[in-house]
Image (cartoon, grey):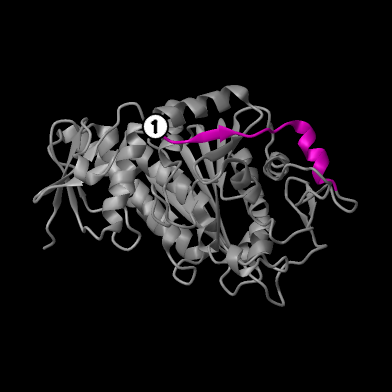
Amino acid sequence: MSVSLAIEISMSAAPEQWGESALLSFQSDHATIHINEEQDIIRQIQKAARKLSTMGIPEITLTGELWQTEWRWAANQGFYNPKTGANVNWGEVSEQEASLLDTRKLATEWVREMINKTPEDLGPSQLALQAAEFLSELDSKHITYRFVNGEELLKQGYVGIYNVGRGSVRQGAMLQLDYNPTGNPDAPYDVALVGKGITFDSGGYSLKGNDGMSVMKSDMGGAATVTGALALAITQGLKKRVKLLLCCAENLVSGHAFKLGDIIQYKNGVSVEILNTDAEGRLVLADGLIAACELNAKVIIDAATLTGAAKMAVGRDYNSILSMDDDLVHKTLTCAREENEQAWPLPLAPWHTEQIGSAFADIANSGSAEGTAGASTAAAFLSKFVTHPEKNWLHFDLSGAYQKSPNDLWAAGGKGHGVRTIAKLLLEL
């Protein structure tokens, strides 16, 4: 049994021997985090916990009277290690606070663990199945689901997932999961969640370089995030009917892979010319968005690790949000702020679709004009598959879902960033 190190909070500066403005000091039986109240307290605590994790400390216990719920959670996020998880004892907390923290931990660490799995261990069908099983374990009474796999995708018109996935021996898959706590099988769908589940992205024939491809096990971060968000909302008493649509495929190179110049005809009538096989996430999401619209869901939220442009714009600290619905953007930013997550809006207007024109199809899957905004044109592409994109549709480009290299806040790998924001949206919409 590993020994747990007690961690206290102090609002006083560390003793001089620990250095000027030291964040941590150590005693024989515990460590102290020294808070500067003029700076961001949550970031300070997460940094301190991250430092403790890098020191090889196997477990911590949060002791003393100064700890607050959000501070405890920050310690958990910083102490997380992709090899061991976050072995954090919350300390003396109420049953209600422990339940809140435990459910956050369950949902968020599932997301982080799924993103960190190897692409060999997590193919498209495995991702769909593990998401369904995870949610069913939380509430089997109100959950039903089905899978659409391989050639059946083509028969049902899900041509994006089929074409992106046909270069792999592991066929594409769509999870269609219904969470219906109303007891009424005819109840309308309050929300549809659509997640990009590219379990590995080589770029296809628009082949990525080694550096870019090395982290592409994380390209299913959107599917993991919306699954984790639904899980968290369920544990917090979600009463709305929600449809979860995960669009899962491997984007590989083979004699059967889709190619530049191909044209994909979607079942909503939109034709797409392939100008870049590495712009595949939008192709699979299109199927999920069409399915969401067929259900007449009141609100549609999709999430994807979609563009490098979003990461260039906001880095890996923020998730980007794009929508033509200003009220929904405002609601999302409010939810993110209340949940201590970072979100930032990027522009999206109807005219952005003019930047993805094609000489051979209705649109192309990549903008070719000089000066186009990559994240905005990607969202504009998705808007072509939403019946009324100007209202009640929100797109998350998950710039902050994955940490390529460790830093002073996060371990390398999946972060679970965005789970709390989307869960709160589900509860409050």
Kind of residue sitting beneath label 1: Glu
**Figure quadrant of residue 392:** top right
Badge 1: how crowded within 10 Å, few (<14), some, or many (20+)?
some
The residue indicated by pointer 1 is: 339
In the image, 69: left or right of 264? left
Whether residue 189 is visible here, answered yes or no, is no
Closer to the camera, 230 or 80? 80
Position of the N terminus, as image quadrant, is: bottom left
The stretch drawn in magenta includes residue 419: no
Q: Position of residue 175 (x, y in %)?
A: 51, 54
Residue 39 to residue 385: above or below:
above
In the image, 256: left or right of 340? right
* Residue located 56% across and 50% down the image: 305
Residue 309 to residue 133: above or below:
above
Q: Circle 1 — which element?
A: loop
* Residue located 46% across and 66% down the image: 122
The stretch drawn in magenta includes residue 346: yes
In the image, 293: left or right of 91? right
* Residue located 34% across and 26% down the image: 38
Q: Position of residue 292 (x, y in %)?
A: 59, 41
Q: Residue furthest left?
A: 29
* Residue located 72% across and 77% down the image: 255
Closer to the camera, 50 or 292? 50
